[in-house]
């Protein structure tokens, strides 16, 4: 060891002797320099500049870009005073420090102080060479001398601050201050600066989370040598390393694939809101099926900016919920969430008005015979009520008039990319027979909220402005808002109506639970289910997803932005005051059907009051293609009926709704009362 320090001193001395100066100069000039390009982590920032995500560089290290002007001057002064006080005067090797180290080693029988300059430490860090062998030290001396010829002092200092190790996979001062103190290096206390000066010399044995005593002692030596006030030594050392943020991992991964060579990417997300929405998604699945996943998007429907995006509660591939799958971009069945768009088209086309009466009765369209979710039928009711109750028959009847391709055209015009099994849309798309993503649904509902104009969703602040696309008239959009805002909040959430307009949906087999809503400023979408498509028993959009939606709105703002005002041309009338064609919906073939052979109930007549006789009541039917089906209060009572006169087994007191359906799906209905 003593010989090694003597050799170092001798080499440095020879470099100053005139006779060997030329040879030394050639030796330094021929030095092969390592790469001085610093690979730094890609940083994702939120709309305010807060850190969202840091991507590691090679071998999983976190090394963040740094500018010398962004570092606390007090830290820089302390570093130079402790490590290399003649840094700005020597040419890479400090002869005086080397000789002093050699003399101390000889007189004390071991190392007392090191002779390495900051430039020599940069040489070691660039080549990842050790300090234990004399060959390594000689290489560091040569490389330090060569570096000083091509780099300025600030450049060398910046290289040191970029590569200095701070424990674990953390390299560089910025990563170090964020990991140990959760802040940027612009302003540091004396105690923080001293620990950060001491750590790179022994980053593992001085780690404060594992070796707090060693960390305190090393910090104390720095404070003592730099003559810092005594109270700085009393400050506690950090007990754990702060993990780097990993907000919106699915969305940031997508962004990185889009712009892979950008060092810093600014997103429209809000880090504080993102953290709250991630916690909300995690809580939504806690204590439930461990394979259950959730996804949430929060956006400003005026600008299209995404403020928060959660692709799954846990960003992991080890869990049964397949956390690495981004469920905001997964194709899923939307259940009833497309119904408002069918009504919106019907409003715009003048087919119906919110107060138009429409019949909710068993209806067949060829071999397709949709049913309501509960198997019951409500008879004649307003379109408003049909949408509020999310009944299945009315929107299918309307879509049959409009044509499924018109709905698909609206979705695509709004920027969605729906996928239909078999490629050709049928009436089943009204009830979820199509694949669509949460991202697309949120964008489309933002169009309803935004007066019928879809503002495409964006998440990068540098994204080029995109023109909004109109998907329906402002009147139709307002009418949908007016209806959906009347839907009561979930029972255990409570609160006043008409602050949030929303729609829920449940796909076939309980595979997907949805809730999409908006107020005057924001649109939010919630999805819950299993990524593998397995049914989740008991999963209903209204029970499972709607409460999460309202909680998410509570995180966005406690004050609701007011809803839109009705456009001047909006027709706001009661059913009886509507123009005759809008008072009651009739299909294009209804008049023809009535003139030919649609079924009719001859007896009992509409509104009849009959006495109970114990044997049922007589039923007389006219027209209709046999066989016939008779329902009472939505439940089948007689099926395959080929007689037009029969007895109906009905003897319960009170009101009853009698419906008859023929073989072509045409229906008739009367309501009576037994007493």
Image (cartoon, rainbow, N blue to C red):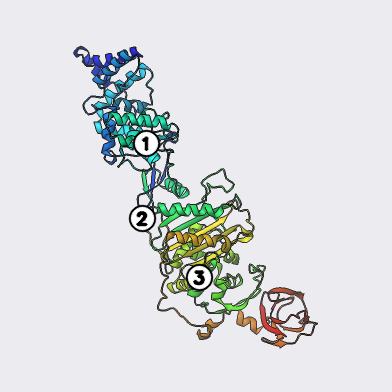
- Residue toward you, 212 or 5: 212
Q: CA distance from mark 1 to mark 2?
A: 28 Å
**Are circles 2 and 3 on residues that touch, CB within 8 Å?**
no
Decide which of tag 1 and tag 2 comes sooner along the chain: 1
- Residue toward you, 476 or 159: 159
Q: Quadrant of residue 80?
A: top left
Q: Please tell me whether mark 2 or mark 3 is closer to you in this view.
A: 3
Q: Provide the residue designation for mark 2.
A: 464
Q: CA distance from mark 2 to mark 3?
A: 32 Å
Is residue 662 visible to us here?
A: yes
- Residue toward you, 61 or 330: 61
Is residue 420 visible to us here?
A: no
Mark 2, Cα crowd under 10 Å, few <14 / some 14-19 / many 20+, is: few
Quadrant containing the N terminus is: top left
- Residue toward you, 268 or 458: 268
The disc at residue 39 is: 1
Q: In the visual, does 570 lie left or right of 81?
A: right
Q: Provide the residue designation for mark 3.
A: 484
């Amino acid at each position: 060891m003593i010989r090694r320090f003597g050799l170092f001193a001798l080499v440095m001395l020879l470099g100053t002797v005139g006779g060997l100066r030329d040879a030394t100069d050639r030796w330094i000039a021929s030095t092969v320099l390592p790469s001085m390009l610093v690979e730094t982590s890609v940083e994702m920032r939120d709309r305010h500049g807060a850190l969202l995500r840091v991507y590691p560089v090679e071998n999983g290290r976190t090394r963040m870009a740094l500018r010398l002007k962004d570092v606390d001057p007090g830290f820089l002064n302390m570093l130079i005073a402790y490590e290399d006080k003649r840094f700005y005067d020597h040419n890479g090797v400090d002869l005086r420090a080397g000789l002093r180290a050699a003399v101390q080693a000889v007189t004390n029988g071991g190392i007392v102080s090191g002779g390495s300059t900051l430039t020599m430490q940069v040489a070691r860090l660039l080549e990842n060479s050790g300090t234990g062998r004399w060959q390594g030290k000689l290489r560091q001396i040569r490389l330090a001398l060569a570096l000083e010829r091509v780099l300025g002092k600030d450049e060398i200092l910046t290289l040191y601050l970029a590569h200095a190790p701070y424990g674990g996979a953390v390299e560089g001062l910025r990563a170090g201050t964020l990991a140990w103190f959760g802040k940027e290096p612009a302003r540091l206390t004396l105690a923080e600066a001293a620990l950060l000066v001491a750590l790179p010399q022994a980053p593992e044995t001085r780690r404060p989370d594992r070796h707090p005593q060693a960390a305190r002692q090393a910090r104390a030596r720095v404070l003592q040598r730099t003559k810092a006030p005594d109270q700085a030594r009393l400050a506690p050392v950090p007990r754990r390393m702060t993990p780097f943020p990993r907000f919106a991992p699915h969305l940031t991964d997508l962004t990185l694939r889009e712009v892979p060579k950008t060092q810093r990417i600014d997103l429209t997300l809000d880090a504080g809101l993102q953290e709250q929405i991630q916690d909300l998604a995690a809580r939504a699945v806690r204590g439930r099926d461990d394979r259950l996943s959730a996804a949430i998007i929060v956006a400003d429907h005026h600008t299209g900016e995404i403020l928060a995006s959660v692709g799954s509660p846990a960003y992991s591939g080890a869990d049964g919920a397949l956390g690495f799958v981004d469920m905001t971009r997964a194709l899923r069945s939307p259940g009833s969430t497309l119904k408002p768009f069918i009504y919106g088209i019907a409003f715009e086309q003048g087919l119906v008005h919110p107060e138009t009466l429409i019949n909710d009765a068993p209806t067949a369209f060829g071999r397709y015979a949709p049913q309501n979710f509960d198997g019951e039928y409500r008879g004649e009711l307003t379109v408003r009520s049909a949408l509020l109750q999310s009944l299945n028959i009315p929107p299918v009847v309307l879509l049959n008039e409009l044509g499924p391709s018109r709905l698909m055209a609206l979705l695509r015009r709004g920027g969605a990319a729906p996928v239909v099994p078999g490629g050709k849309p049928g009436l089943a798309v009204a009830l979820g027979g199509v694949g669509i993503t949460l991202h697309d649904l949120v964008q489309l509902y933002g169009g309803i909220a935004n007066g019928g104009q879809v503002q495409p969703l964006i998440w990068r602040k540098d994204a080029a402005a995109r023109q909004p696309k109109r998907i329906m008239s402002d009147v139709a959009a307002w009418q949908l808002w007016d209806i959906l805002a009347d839907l009561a909040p979930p029972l255990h959430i409570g609160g006043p109506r008409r602050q949030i307009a929303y729609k829920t949906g449940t796909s076939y087999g309980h595979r997907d639970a949805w809730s999409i809503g908006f107020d005057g400023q924001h649109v939010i979408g919630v999805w819950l289910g299993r990524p593998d498509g397995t049914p989740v028993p008991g999963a209903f959009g209204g029970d499972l997803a709607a409460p999460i939606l309202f909680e998410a709105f509570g995180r966005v703002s406690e004050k609701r932005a007011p809803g839109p005002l009705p456009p001047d041309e909006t027709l706001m009338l009661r059913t009886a005051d509507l123009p005759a064609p809008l008072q009651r919906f009739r299909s294009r073939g209804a008049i023809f059907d009535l003139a030919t052979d649609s079924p009719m109930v001859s007896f009992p007549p509409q509104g009849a009051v009959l006495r109970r006789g114990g044997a049922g009541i007589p039923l007389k039917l006219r027209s209709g293609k046999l066989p016939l089906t008779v329902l009472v209060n939505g439940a089948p009572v007689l099926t395959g009926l080929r007689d037009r006169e029969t007895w109906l087994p009905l003897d319960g007191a009170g009101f009853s709704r009698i419906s008859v359906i023929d073989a072509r799906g045409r229906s008739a209905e009367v309501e009576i009362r037994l007493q």
